[in-house]
Image (tube, rainbow, N blue to C red):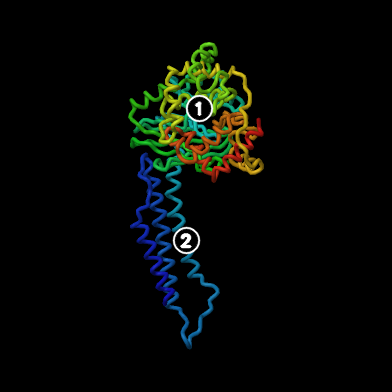
Amino acid sequence: MLLAAALILLTLGSVLFHYLSPWYFTPIASNWGVIDDLLGNTVFATGVAFVAVNLFMAFCVVRFRHQKGTKADYEPESKKLEGWLFVLTTAGVAALLAPGLFAWAKIVDVPKDAQVVEAVGRQWHWMFRFPGKDGKLGSTDPRFVTEANPFGINPDDPDGQDDVLVVSPELHLPVNVTRKVQLRSVDVLHDFSVPQFRVRMDLVPGLATRVWFTPNKTGTFNLNCQELCGTGHFAMLGRIVVEEQQAFDSWLATWPTFAQSLSKPAGDATAGAALFAVCSACHSQNGEGNPAVHAPKLAGQSDWYLARQLKSFKGGLRGTSNGDSNGATMMPMAATLADDAAIDNVVAYIRSLPDQPAPATLNGNFEHGKSIYNEVCGTCHGHDGKGVRATNAPRLAGMSDWYLTTQLSNFRHGIRGRHPQDYYGQQMGSMAAMLTDDQAMTDVAAYVNSLR
């Protein structure tokens, strides 16, 4: 009797928990309400089966409990019972699967008026591509993928010249406009998933998959990769901003076309020399850095990374967090660079400076640091520490070791990488959290010193 009562209470408690629980689906923000209907149908069908089976078990425990003077009947086969089980099981499976087939038919049937956008996944970030005025996306091929052409667009295809390239994990979309999202991966399996949109799809290397939806609510939504894609899978985060058409048009106009990205003039080192005079006061004449004023070595650092950090300081992504006094000092310095051309010029001058390894200032456990670096850092920054542009990871080898530990600490404690638009800083915050204490950071820096 106690067992029967426990089964009944378990069943009743489960049903009440489902209906009274504060945890439920995220609010839907697209046209795919049918997905919620399917989930509700699945929960109802399995819920009915759950209640029926448990109550039947409770009934059997009471009805067929052991009693003195009675003997259990042995009936190895029952065609009647097997027939009922077959009918009920078939009906249950049909009730679960049939609606899903109709929904899948809608998912794969993209409306003809859907406007296309391409989402490209690679370890461990997102990029996006919009067609230009011709309404066509240019052809792509992995053999065209370079640092200057991360999308792998065919430079000889005229349809690709006006494609708008969004080299950022943040995608903007206009509200109430149907979008076909063409999905492509340049390395491994990824997955495009926005919980509020209720649809998701894998990105398969060598194939172009697709998904479509109509965002019907303005707001900001997280874009997740829900396919285990490597060490940094958990940090592969993006964001989708749904806004009015005018705001979307203004945002899209800030990004270059493929032709513009190819024709962008190189920085002028001569012009950059005059601009670097402001920098040299702290970072020294040859960009070797000065620990006394918390200025790291710049010479030899990846030019794309220097440009990105200067823009982050100018845009407030760095230097605005509480506790980042050194970053706050850099903000007015970066503000002296009037525009992107000035940034490119000063970076070009830094690239021309002699590259001598920064002196080692830290001692740590080399073997322990090597183990951590190879497991956590090397996948992005390269096992030689020279940095990898494809993973947005700068050079570490030969740079200032004290600055490395300082920034790892800042990432760990949320001083750096807290700004909502600092996507790469947020990624590093997650990775730095894997270093359990200050000694681990010192050990990593000690190993990085050996890579010079």
Q: Residues within 10 Å of mark 2 (few under 14, many from 20)?
A: few
Who is closer to the viewer here, 385 or 259? 385
Instruction: Please tell me which residue is depicted at 43% across the width and 17% down the height of the picture.
Output: 338
Who is closer to the viewer here, 5 or 299? 299
Name above or below for residue 163 compared with residue 20.
above
Residue kind at label 1, given as amino acid type: Val
Q: Residues within 10 Å of mark 1 (few under 14, many from 20)?
A: few
Give the residue pinned by disc 2: 89
Instruction: Say which mark, if any, is on residue 242.
Output: none
Q: Secondary structure at mark 2?
A: helix
Who is closer to the viewer here, 417 or 255? 417
Q: Is residue 322 visible?
A: yes
Numbered-mark total: 2
Residue kind at label 2, given as amino acid type: Thr
Give the residue pinned by disc 1: 293
Marks 2 and 1, Cα distance to the nearest angstrom?
A: 74 Å
Q: Quadrant of the N terminus?
A: bottom left
